[in-house]
Amino acid sequence: MPRPLIGVSGWSYDSWRGDFYPEGLARTKQLTYLASQLPAVEVNGTFYSLQRPTTFRRWAEQTPEDFVVSLKGSRYVTHLLRLVNVETALANFFASGVLELGARLGPIVWQLPATITWDADLIDRFLGLLPRTTVAAGRLAEQHDDRLPPERATTTPLVDVPIHHVLEVRHESFVVPEFEALLHRHDVAAVRNDAPKPWPVLDIASSSVAYARLHGHTRLYASRYSDAGLDGWAQWCERWLEAGRDVHVYFDNDSEGHAPHDAVRLLGRVRRD
C-alpha cells in the first residue's frame, strides 16, 4: 500500500530542543524521538561528506524497521565533478555505509547546482550509472578507492531491495519535454520544489515514487506553512497516493524550528493507518 512518507531534512537543530524535542531529551535520543512522530527523514550530512558505516548503523538501530531514511547524494559528485567522471566517487558514496540502512534506505536525492543546465547526454550518462538495487550498489561499492580503507567501507548489502533516485534541478532549462522523457526512461523522480527562489517547479509522473522538498514558501528555510498551504500539499500527496506511489515530503524550513511541526501537521492531514 502506498505510504505518505512525510518528514524533515535533518534533525540536529538546537532550536528544536525544548520545543519539538521534550525538555532535557538527550541528543543521542533525538532521532528515536523523531521516528516516534514521523515516518521518514532526509539526511543532509551525506551531501557534505562521506559518513562512516557505524553512523548509518546507529541510525538504523535508533529507528523502527518501517522507518525510511532518504539520503542526499554527495556534492562531490554533483557540484565538484559536475556529473563527469564520477564512477569512483559514486563507488565511495555507496561504500561509505549506505548499505547498513538495509530496508530503511529511502530514495537518494541528487541535487544539481543552478549552474548546471539541461544537457541530455550528460544527464543520461549520469542516471545510467546509478545502481537500482542494494545488490547493484554493493557491486559498485567494491570499486571504491583508498579514500575509504577497508575498515571504513561496506560493500555487502543486508537485504536485496530497490533503490530509488531523485533529481533536484535548479535551472529553468530543464523544463523541456526531453527531460521528462529521460526521467521516465530511467525511472527517476524529479523533486517538486517549494521555495521563494527562481527554481523550476516540476510535477511529473516519471517514477514509482513522488518526492517534494519544502524549503519555506515565503522565506527560504524559515517561514512557517499556513493551514491553507498544508491543505494544498495534502491534496498533492493524495493525488500521488491514489496513483499508487509512495509520497516523500521533507520540510527544510528548519532555521526557526517550523519544519517538524509543519511535517506533523501535514502528516495528520494525509495519515493512513
Image (tube, rainbow, N blue to C red):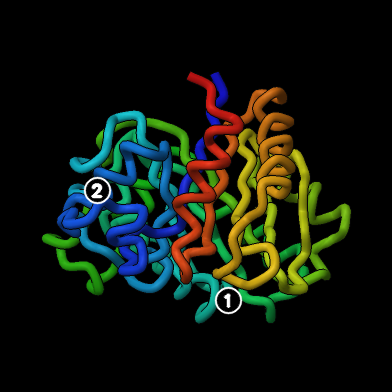
- Cα distance, mark 1 to mark 2? 29 Å
Any part of residue 131 in sight: no
Q: What residue does disc 2 label?
A: 59
Question: What crowding class fits label 2: few (fewer than 14 Cα within 10 Å), some (14-19), or many (20 or more)?
Answer: some
Q: Position of residue 104 (x, y in %)?
A: 35, 37
Q: Position of residue 178 (x, y in %)?
A: 85, 54
Q: Nearer the viewer, residue 206 or 12?
A: 12
Q: Position of residue 1 (x, y in %)?
A: 54, 18
Q: Nearer the viewer, residue 72 or 264?
A: 264
Any part of residue 113 in sight: yes
Picture quadrant of residue 32: top left
Q: Secondary structure at mark 1?
A: loop
Residue ID at (62%, 64%): 216
Q: What residue does disc 1 label?
A: 82
Residue type indicated by callout 2: Trp
CB atoms at circles 1 and 2 under 8 Å apart?
Answer: no
Residue type indicated by callout 1: Arg
Residue ID at (44%, 38%): 133
Residue ID at (60%, 55%): 213
Q: Is residue 49 left or right of residue 255?
A: left
Residue ID at (17%, 57%): 24
